[in-house]
Image (cartoon, rainbow, N blue to C red):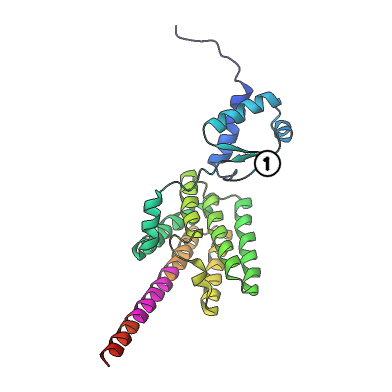
């Protein structure tokens, strides 16, 4: 009969599987440095040769990368979802901005509902901590800091949704947002009224999550992104009208 003797699993394979899962679940993030070989071997309860073998396996597969004199890091596995040509195309056309917001509204609404239902108390505490930092940054009137915390807040919700595909996909999308591919987020923080409204919207999302209100969390996220879409649309129309007025003025000047 086709039965084979069960062989004990190599320790290095167990190490590989554990690190794989940490990367898959987003616990180990791209660019994050692993502990030293000695510390990591102690934490995992394996010999240093077994750990080296596992690390070499993960390096060969592009999941870990060595930096000379600096240690072992999680490889930059996020961000290659689109070609450079397509990313440039996104950045050149407003249509991509609004499709991006629509995509976020659908996915993040779902993520917020899942986070309210499936997120651990620790997950929701992380979201709440970031929101408290947003409140503190709001008083400083620092648009760059507010924009950074805004991204961290939304990504923390996606992490709390416990869907690894959604997590890695949205991390790639947010990386492009940080790079200004879709729109400059600092534009959203120019006006005091806009800043106050955005903070209040994030408060509503946070409150619904802490209450584990699935429908409320989803609705709050959707309302927030509707507002972002409307604000950017108004800004685009204002710029268009300004350009038209400028052209008319130039035309009238040329006639006279």
Furthest toward the bottom, the residue is 256
Residue drawn at the location 61% of the way across and 63% of the way down: 131
Determine whether the residue tagged by mark 1 lies in a helix, strand or loop.
loop
Numbered disc total: 1
Q: Quadrant of the C terminus?
A: bottom left
- Residue 139 lies left or right of residue 165; in this view the side is right
Q: Is residue 235 magenta?
A: yes
Q: Position of residue 168 (x, y in %)?
A: 49, 47
Query: What main secondary structure does the magenta stretch of the protein show?
Result: helix
> In x, y percent, where is residue 136?
66, 69
The percent coordinates of residue 33 (x first, y second) are 65, 43
In the depicted structure, whether residue 127 falls above or below residue 39: below
Q: Residue at x 49, y 71 (%)?
A: 187
Asked if residue 162 is positioned above or below residue 135 in the image, the reply reads above
Quarter placement of the N terminus: top left
Q: Give the labeled residue for mark 1.
A: 70
Q: From the viewer's perspective, is residue 68 above or below residue 149?
A: above
């Amino acid at each position: 009969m086709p039965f084979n003797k069960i062989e004990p699993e190599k320790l290095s394979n167990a190490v590989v599987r554990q690190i794989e899962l940490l990367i898959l679940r987003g616990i180990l993030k791209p660019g994050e440095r692993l502990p030293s070989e000695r510390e990591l071997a102690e934490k995992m309860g394996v010999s240093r040769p077994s750990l080296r073998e596992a690390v070499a396996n993960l390096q060969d597969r592009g999941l870990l990368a060595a930096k000379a004199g600096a240690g072992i890091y999680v490889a930059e596995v996020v961000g290659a979802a689109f070609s450079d040509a397509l990313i440039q195309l996104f950045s050149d056309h407003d249509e991509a901005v609004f499709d991006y917001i629509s995509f976020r509204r659908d996915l993040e609404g779902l993520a917020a509902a899942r986070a309210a239902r499936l997120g651990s108390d620790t997950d929701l505490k992380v979201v709440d901590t970031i929101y408290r930092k947003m409140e503190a940054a709001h008083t400083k009137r620092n648009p760059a800091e507010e924009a950074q915390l805004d991204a961290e807040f939304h990504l923390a919700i996606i992490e709390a949704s416990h869907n690894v595909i959604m997590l890695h996909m949205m991390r790639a999308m947010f990386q492009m947002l940080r790079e200004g591919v879709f729109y400059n987020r600092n534009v959203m923080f120019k006006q005091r009224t806009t800043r106050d409204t955005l903070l209040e919207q994030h408060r509503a999302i946070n409150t619904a999550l802490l209450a584990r209100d699935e429908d409320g969390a989803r609705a709050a996220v959707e309302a927030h992104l509707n507002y972002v879409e409307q604000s950017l649309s108004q800004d685009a129309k204002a710029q268009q009208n300004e350009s038209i007025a400028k052209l008319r003025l130039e035309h009238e000047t040329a006639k006279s």
